[in-house]
Image: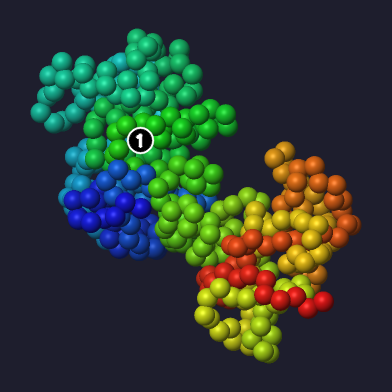
């Protein structure tokens, strides 16, 4: 995360912002700051409140509580068109009868700011078109463009306004998977050229992890964690984040701490990686990160158990391994592994494989396999 050394480095600042519709609280009070040039992704399942956050920043919805600052200015009572933001939506709604050039220039012609000279409009339109690589298509109509090109027109229409902040609400979700991957790259390319603060909404964890400087994970109107992609992956704040990020999904096991304070999974005793003392007979939840578990031939491995299922993914395979005591793990193996359901599999746990959460699902610490009793 870029260090926020002075207030002028902050493009967006949300302070104790909350949203209710009548008695229904759709967003609990939260704080969020976005630095100049930063690319922040709001990630969470449908209905968690992502779009509502963008709409409050854009002024399309009023915040029920809290302060919204854009480029150093308190904007709660500023009308949308006077806020220094531009929004890009999933449904980009281009004007079909206008050319690409006219579509891009449209926000400038409609601007209530002092009238821009024609030459300025032309120059800024050409520049925006160049940034999104649409210069050869300026005289076409939207119907003569591909889906990706149309989405780039929508992006250019935001760029041409030269806002302090870009707000993007699932802008790629109308595109097919291949094109989406291409557009991700070109969006990041555009971002690195204009370096403006961007808040980008998606429900797709891969999009979030690949694009973001920082990710804000949201569930049911509550911010779960804000962090860089690797922080979310290696130290998920709670079981929701642990399961929402990463594929295959992290299995969770409810375990009881033994009388002597030890935590055992299968026949292994876990060594906690922090100086925490677990209450004897407390219930904790243990999560095993599939990508950090490996099937191995070594009998000195951390766990062993019976393979139940094998998922072939092309680059590798995942085995579901029954560890006994009601626990199972998803374990990475070679794509062409000859392990079949019913075989005994030894499992190595790399650092970062094991996460311990309290009864409320909040992460306590990580763990490794200390000793095995066999
Ligand atoms: N005008 C409204 N009146 C009442 N509830 C609304 C309204 N708009 C959105 N909501 C509710 O607010 C929650 C968050 O919606 P939204 O921000 O659109 O979620 P997301 O973009 O994450 O899918 C949802 O539960 C939705 O039903
Ligand atoms: Mg939405």
- The picture places residue 331, in percent across and down from the top left corner, at 72, 55
- The residue located at (72%, 44%) in the rendering is 316
- The picture places residue 120, in percent across and down from the top left corner, at 16, 20
| Residue 132 visible to an observer of this rendering | yes
Picture layout, residue 99 above or below residue 115: above
290 to the left or right of 238: right
Which of the pair 69/248 is nearer the observer?
Answer: 248
- The picture places residue 307, in percent across and down from the top left corner, at 83, 57
The structure's colour scheme is: rainbow
94 to the left or right of 279: left
- The residue located at (31%, 27%) in the rendering is 157
Which of the pair 275/106 is nearer the observer?
Answer: 275
Q: Can you identify the residue that label 1 sits on?
A: 191
Q: Residue lying at the far right in this picture: please name it.
A: 342
How packed is label 1: few (under 14 Cα within 10 Å), some, or many (20 or more)?
some
154 to the left or right of 127: right
Q: Quadrant of residue 107?
A: top left
- The residue located at (70%, 40%) in the rendering is 315
- The picture places residue 354, in percent across and down from the top left corner, at 62, 66
- Numbered circles on residues, count: 1
Q: Secondary structure at mark 1?
A: helix
- The residue located at (72%, 38%) in the rendering is 314
301 to the left or right of 66: right
Q: Quadrant of residue 91?
A: top left
Q: Residue lying at the far bottom in this picture: please name it.
A: 259
Q: Residue lying at the far left in this picture: please name it.
A: 114
Q: Quadrant of residue 266?
A: bottom right
| Residue 105 visible to an observer of this rendering | no
Label 1 within 8 A of ligand 2 by Cβ: no
Which of the pair 7/317 is nearer the observer?
Answer: 317
Q: Quadrant of the C terminus?
A: bottom right
């Amino acid at each position: 995360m870029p260090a926020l050394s002075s207030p002028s480095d902050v493009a967006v600042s949300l302070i104790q912002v909350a949203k209710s519709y009548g008695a229904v609280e759709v967003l609990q009070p939260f704080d969020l700051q976005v630095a100049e040039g930063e690319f922040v992704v709001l990630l969470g399942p449908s209905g968690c409140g992502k779009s509502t956050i963008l709409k409050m920043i854009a002024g399309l919805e009023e915040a029920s509580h809290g302060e919204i600052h854009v480029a150093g200015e308190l904007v709660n009572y500023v009308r949308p068109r006077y806020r220094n933001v531009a929004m890009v939506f999933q449904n980009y709604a281009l004007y079909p009868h206008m050319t690409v050039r006219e579509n891009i220039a449209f926000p400038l012609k409609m601007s209530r700011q002092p009238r821009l000279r024609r030459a300025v409009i032309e120059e800024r339109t050409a520049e925006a078109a160049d940034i999104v690589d649409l210069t050869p298509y300026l005289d076409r109509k939207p119907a003569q463009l591909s889906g990706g090109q149309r989405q780039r027109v929508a992006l250019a229409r935001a760029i041409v306004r030269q806002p302090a902040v870009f707000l993007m609400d699932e802008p790629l979700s109308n595109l097919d998977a291949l094109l989406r991957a291409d557009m991700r790259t070109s969006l990041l390319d555009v971002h690195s050229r204009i370096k403006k603060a961007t808040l980008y909404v998606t429900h797709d964890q891969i999009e979030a992890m690949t694009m973001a400087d920082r990710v804000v994970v949201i569930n049911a109107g509550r911010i779960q964690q804000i962090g860089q992609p690797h922080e979310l992956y290696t130290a998920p704040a709670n079981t929701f984040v642990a399961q929402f990020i990463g594929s295959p999904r992290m299995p969770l096991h409810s375990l009881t701490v033994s009388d002597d304070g030890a935590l055992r999974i299968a026949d292994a005793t876990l060594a906690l990686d922090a100086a925490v003392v677990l209450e004897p007979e407390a219930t904790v939840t243990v999560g095993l990160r599939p990508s950090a578990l490996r099937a191995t031939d070594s009998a000195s491995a951390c766990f062993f158990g019976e393979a139940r299922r094998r998922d072939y993914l092309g680059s590798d395979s995942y085995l579901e391994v029954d560890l006994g005591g009601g626990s199972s793990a998803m374990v990475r193996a070679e794509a062409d592994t000859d392990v079949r359901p019913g075989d005994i599999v030894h499992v190595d746990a790399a650092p970062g494989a094991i996460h311990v959460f309290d009864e409320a699902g909040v992460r306590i610490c990580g763990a490794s396999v200390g000793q095995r009793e066999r």
